[in-house]
Amino acid sequence: MRCIICGKDLSPSEGKLICDDCFSKLLKDPQLLKEKVLDQIDNPILVVDKETTKIVGANENLLQFVGKPLDDVVGSLGGNVIGCIHADKLGGCGNTEFCSDCPLRNMVEETIEDNQSKVYNNIDMTLNSDGKVIRAKFDVSTKIKDGTVLIQINDFIVIDF
Ligand SMILES: [Zn+2]
């Protein structure tokens, strides 16, 4: 396996598409990151900065899923993008009284703390979807990469609306 950007040899065991050097360069260009790397992944994927927890990348699948353009997604917080019902409350995503119980937030924090990939199934979230409140379950996996956390949605079902 070679890096799809620079052609450098990658360790096959890691299953990477791109070397760390190219990835950190692409983080400065969300459009290119999307086209060159993230769109190669079949599931919706979000890339979140470890320090700020703001979104630095997303693929086409994710944009379709949330119904927003890349420009609206990059620089935003996860809760605003997926339509968390608490995200527009006092303090905003990450700072409301509900955030300490947020499975998405805890998942990212655990991934950063343990510095390793994680799989989370049946994450229960209540979301605003086109003005309707829905309850949904997500299967998600996370990966730490070069100062970011990749969040991949593996499955999603609406359980109540
Ligand atoms: Zn490379």
Image: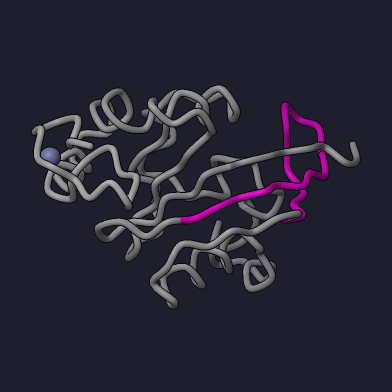
Q: Residue at x 69, y 70 (%)?
A: 101
Side of 112 where 81 appears, left or right: right
Nearer the observer, 54 or 114: 114
* Overall secondary structure of the magenta section: strand
Q: Which residues are magenta?
A: 123-142
The image shows residue 27 at horizontal and vertical percentages of 22, 43
Instruction: Determine the residue positioned at 49% across, 49% down.
Output: 151
Res 133 quadrant in image: top right
Q: Residue at x 39, y 56 (%)?
A: 149
In the image: residue 35, left or right of residue 156: left
Q: Is residue 98 above or below residue 152?
A: below
Q: Quadrant of residue 34?
A: top left
Question: Could you say where residue 158 lies in the image, as x and y percent from the top left?
Answer: 82, 37
Residue at the outermost bottom position: 113
137, above or below 36, in the image:
below
Inspect the magenta stretch and tell me whether residue 53 lies in it: no
Quadrant (top left/top right/bottom left/bottom right) for the N terminus: top left
Task: Reply yes or no: does residue 136 show up in magenta.
Answer: yes
Q: Relative to residue 22, is residue 30 depicted above or below?
A: above
